[in-house]
Structure formats: structure tokens, C-alpha cells
Amino acid sequence: MTFDVQAVRKNEFPLLLADDVVYLNNASTGPLPRRTMDTLAEWARHRAVPHRISQEMEFGTLDRGRRLIAELIGAHESEIALGTNTSFGLNLAAFSLPLERGDVVLSPDLEFPANVYPWMQLAARRGIEYRRLRCDDGPLNVDRLSRELEDGRVRAVTVSWVQFASGARVDLAALGQLCRDRGVYFVVDAIQGLGPLTLDLRSTPVDILACGAQKWLLSPWGAGFVYVSRDLIPQLQPHDVSWLAVKDSDDFTRLTNYDLTWRDDARRFEFITLPYQEFAAMNATLELIRELGAANVAAYSQSLADRIVEWACARGDVTLLTPAKRGQYASIISVRPPDPAAASARLSDSGVVHSFREGGIRLSPYFYNTVEEIDRTLAIIG
């Protein structure tokens, strides 16, 4: 770790410190850094006098967001479309991929609903078979997926990088390469992984990756993105069509020259008008992560998660609902003490903000948390 946690807390998260809470609920909603709040306030002042907001200011903000995201995930900015949430990207995948009646879409069971309902609706509309796989022995792995892909009708696999309740993490590179080798589309819900984990899509085969920014990217509600691989973009047509999805639509002097020729890049999928102020604020947080170093943020977050796992494994009265093996979890750790509801109430009474999900206490530490906060939390649970 090469950043000063105490300085980050003091400079960027003063309101959390003032509230005197231990915030371990980043998997639900991330707090906004000071610079991000300042950006929102600045844009609110601009919005009060919209004649002062230039077209360059609006679209320059979106351009900056695409560049920052592309840098964070090892992509090219032409592969990034901005959207308001994870569901935007998952619906794009479900309804734009060239899937036909009789094709099969696979996903692990216990996915977050955002990565289930679009595929259920696709099945209802087009006769696709949506198949959820029980994975009782841990996260979906290459051996299990390889067996499932023996059914030649499987055309797409959709997974959460990190499962929302247990924190179980799949091996994106291995699953993605298997899908690539078999000619199967690989779709990823990345909202619980990006931030606590790093990603380089230059070496990780993914076709479509969707991510809201309100959790681990510490951004306002209404900001997110979808990555569409460069080779796939020309093969897909937008399911929902925006007036800025076509070529030459940046020229506002000839908007009635109607020509339904899509842009060459992922902007063909963007649904304009986007909330510029939310993306300006997202950019501020992405710049903070860039300053701290994405790898440093991930490594520190992992060290806090490791501490919780080691504690749970050392106790005979606590069940670890997260896989215990390092590399199979990120920064979501779920534990079940003898009376989880009572333990959750104790945490709440003590000012430890957490979640109670699927019968377990879900803790999701991040780079603004301290070792002392983790130890205090574990003492209350125990």
C-alpha cells in the first residue's frame, strides 16, 4: 500500500468521520468523496444558469468519463458506452446479442436480479432457454462450465464477477477464454468487483461488461457504463435507439437529415440525454482512484477482507458463507454467527453499517476503512 489511509479519510470522507460510524456497506451504496460532492455542487450552480453550460462542457464530460473508465479496465474508449446503471448494460446484452429461438443462455444460480430478469424476459419474448446452474461446491469454474458447454445450443454465458450476497468471485479470465474458444458470448456484471479488484480487458476475454458506479466506484446514483468489445460492436444494433446513436448526429445544424447509420463505436448504445452532473462527479472519483493507484486500492481492500476471513475460519462458532480460498472472494465477506439477527442488531446499535443478506452478515470494507474498524466489528459479532 502506498497511500495514507488516515489522510484519505480526513481529506475525502470527513462526513463519515463526523457521523462516527464504521461504514462497511459499500456493496450496497458507496459514500461520496469530498471532491465528488464538490463537483456535484459546482454542476448544480451551473445548472441554475444553463446558458453558461456549453456543448463542449457537456460532451467533454462524457468524453472524459469514457477515457477514465477505459484506462481503469484496460479497454479503448471507443468500447465504452455510458449508462445510468448496471441494468442498462445487461439489457443491452440480452436484447442486442444475436440470439435466436432454441439458443441457451447460462448463468450461475443466486445471481443478483438485475442479471436474471432481462434473460427471463428474453426467454419469454423470443423462445430462448435461460438456464441457471446450481453451484453448491463454490463459484462457477472452468470444469463445470466446460461440461455445460457440451450442449451445442449454449450461445451465451452471463455471470457476476463477484456474487452480491456471498462475495464468491469467479475467474473471469479462465471462463472468458473458455467461452471465446467455444464461440460463446461472455457477459459480465462487474458492479461488485470493479474497485476492490483490478481488470485488464486486453488479456481477459469479455464480450459485454456492465457496471453501475454507485457502489465501489463511489459515484452518484445514475452513473455507470457498459463495455462492448471492439469486434462485437459492428455486429450489434441498439435495442433502444437514441437520437445521438447515429453518425453525424453531433452536428446540431442538420438534425432532420434522418439517416439511421449507426456510429462506429460503442456510443451507438448510449441513451442520451445523460445526467452530465452525475458523470462529472463520477469522473472526480475515478481521478481519486487513479491518484491512489487502482492496484493499491485493490490490495488494501483485499487485506481487510482477508482479515475477516481469517477471523471467521479461526472460530468454531461462526460459519463463513464466503469461499475461504484467497482468489475466490473480493471485498464482500458474509458470515453467520450463532444468532445472526441478534449480531446484526448489535452491529447497528454500535454504529457499524452493514447488510443482512440471505441469512448472513455481509461486510464490505474498502480503502477508507481501517484495521481498527475491522477488529472492532469482529469483536461485536463475536
Image (tube, rainbow, N blue to C red):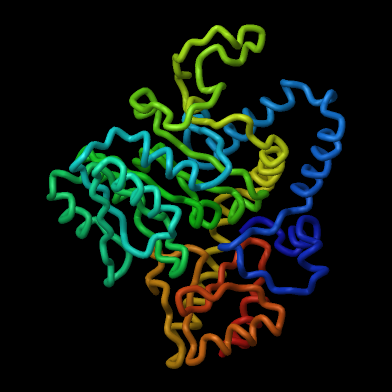
**In the shown orientation, is residue 155 left or right of residue 21?**
left
Residue 111: percent from the left, percent from the top?
A: 39, 60
Name the outermost residue toward the front: 125
Looking at the figure, which quarter contains the N terminus? bottom right
Q: Nearer the viewer, residue 123 or 340?
A: 123
User: Is residue 371 depicted above or below 238 in this figure?
Assistant: below
Image label count: 0
Percent of width and height locating residue 305? 52, 70
- The residue under the point 58% across, 9% down is 256
> Residue 197 or 359: which is nearer the viewer?
359
Q: Is residue 172 left or right of residue 7?
A: left
Q: Can you tell which quarter of the image residue 71 is in? A: top right
The residue lying at 61 percent from left, 15 percent from top is 250
* 228 to 332, vertically: above or below: above
Task: Point out residue 138 in the picture as x, y percentages from the top left corner.
Answer: 31, 69
Residue 177 placed where, x, y %?
A: 28, 44
In the image, what residue occupies the spot 36% across and 53% down?
159
Q: Quadrant of residue 291?
A: top right
17 vs 337: above or below: above
Residue name at image x 33 percent, y 25 percent: 235
Q: Is residue 122 above or below residue 321?
A: above
Which quadrant would the C terminus be assigned to in this image?
bottom right
